[in-house]
């Protein structure tokens, strides 16, 4: 018996997404506000500035912002390996120019 091949589309990268009316792209700085998660590490990054490295959309249409945490000594290594923390668009806000978190 032969089964038909099924293509499963995974997350896809997108160029930008709007958050609070502001376009967010790779390189944009944001402030993190994790919500409703059970990951204890989220409390350590709440309120921290981060740099957007990619924007992804899952198969359900939800956008995720992939970031590295500013000030993390391993941020460059994580970026090199494409190991990011992912947050929904409700969990980030754009960092205003000149604002420090």
Image (tube, helix red, strand yellow):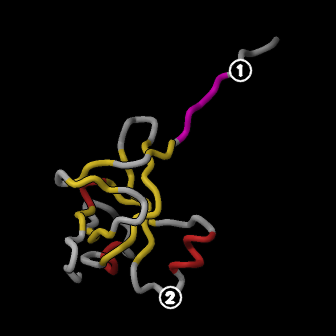
Examine the rendered structure and indicate whether residue 97 appears above or below residue 72: above
Judged from this view, the residue extending furthest toward the front is 97
Seen in the picture, residue 37 relative to 76 is either above or below; the reply is: above
Could you say whether the residue bearing mark 2 is in a helix, strand or loop? loop
| Residue 77 horizontal side relative to residue 59, left or right | right
- Sort mark 1 into few (<14), some (14-19) or many (20+) by Cα contacts within 10 Å: few
Image vertical order of residue 70 relative to residue 24, above or below: below
Q: Which residues are magenta?
A: 6-10
Query: Which numbered marker is on residue 73?
Result: 2
**Mark 1: which secondary structure?**
loop
Q: Residue at x 28, y 53 (%)?
A: 23
Q: Residue at x 39, y 70 (%)?
A: 51
Q: Determine if the magenta segment contains residue 76.
A: no
Category of crowding for the residue at label 2, using alpha-carbon neighbours closer than 10 angstroms: few (below 14), some (14–19), many (at least 20)? few
Q: Mark 1 or mark 2: which comes first in sequence?
A: 1
The residue closer to the viewer here, 7 or 77, is: 77
Tag of residue 21: none
Quadrant in the picture for the C terminus: bottom left
Q: Is residue 58 above or below residue 88?
A: above
Mark 1 lies on residue? 5
Residue drawn at (32%, 56%) of the image: 24
Q: Is most of the magenta stretch helix, strand or loop?
A: loop
Residue 67 pos. (x, y %): 42, 66
The x, y position of residue 8, in whole percent, is 59, 31
Residue closer to the observer: 14 or 44? 14
Position of residue 50 in the picture relative to residue 75 (left or right): left
Residue at the far right in the pictured view: 1
Of residues 44 and 21, the one drawn nearer to the viewer in this rendering: 21
Front label number (1 vs 2): 2
């Amino acid at each position: 018996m032969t089964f038909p091949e099924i293509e499963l589309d995974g997350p896809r990268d997108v160029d930008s997404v709007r958050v609070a009316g502001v376009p967010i792209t790779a390189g944009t700085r944001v402030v993190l506000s994790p919500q409703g998660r059970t990951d204890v590490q989220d409390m350590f990054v709440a309120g921290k500035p981060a740099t957007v490295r990619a924007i992804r959309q899952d198969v359900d249409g939800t956008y995720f912002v992939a970031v590295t945490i500013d000030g993390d000594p391993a941020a460059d290594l994580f970026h090199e390996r494409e190991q990011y923390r992912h947050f929904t668009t409700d969990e980030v806000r754009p960092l205003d120019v000149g604002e420090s978190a």
